[in-house]
Amino acid sequence: MNTQPHINAYSFGCIDIDGRTYTADVIILPGQVQADWWREEGHALKPVDLSAVLEASPQVLVVGQGAYGCMRVPPATVAWLREAGIEVVCGKTPQAVEAYDERCKGSRKVAAALHLTC
């Protein structure tokens, strides 16, 4: 049984996951969605922003950097995740949604951290 939440639709500032609409950034973990995700430094992703992801121990983290790619993912954050054994896939949120959907088709545990606006 696949416990991965399913993204039904994404548009600027809005995402539908399993029939529920979210209008703020989200973290998707196997079996759950954490709404209203915010980062210590709004448009930069730091390890401290991903504690829930690390606790969930996914094999893959897909990062949606915003519709226009405004959220930076510093190399140090990517290195930290890789050291924890997590594959990291980053891109603009529309492409990240597609990448998440594709990776959920397999048997690996997949998480996503999605910036929904800029």
Image (cartoon, rainbow, N blue to C red):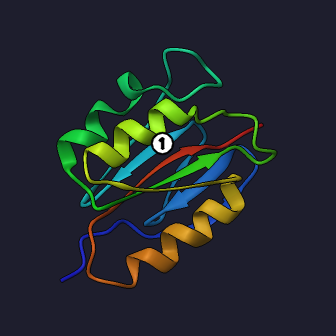
Amino acid marked by disc 1: Val
Q: Position of residue 28 (x, y in %)?
A: 39, 52
In the rendered view, would you say 100 is above or below 53?
Answer: below
Q: Report whether 37 appears left or right of 60.
A: right
In the rendered view, would you say 15 is above or below 19?
Answer: above
Q: Report whether 68 appears left or right of 60.
A: right
Q: Report whether 40 appears left or right of 14.
A: left
In depth, the one of 82 and 53 nearer the eye is 82
Q: Quadrant of the N terminus?
A: bottom left
Element under label 1? strand
Res 44 → quadrant: top right
Q: Inspect this view and state whether residue 25 appears.
A: yes
User: Residue at point 31% right, 69% down?
Assistant: 4
Q: Position of residue 47 (x, y in %)?
A: 39, 28
Return the residue found at the far right.
Answer: 68
User: Residue at point 56% right, 70% down?
Assistant: 99
- Mark 1 surroundings: few (<14), some (14-19) or many (≥20) residues within 10 A: many
Q: Position of residue 111 (x, y in %)?
A: 37, 56
Q: Position of residue 7 (x, y in %)?
A: 51, 67
Return the residue found at the far top.
Answer: 40
Q: Inspect this view and state whether residue 36 appears.
A: no
Residue under circle 1?
A: 26
Res 11 → quadrant: bottom right
User: Residue at point 48% right, 30% down?
Assistant: 76
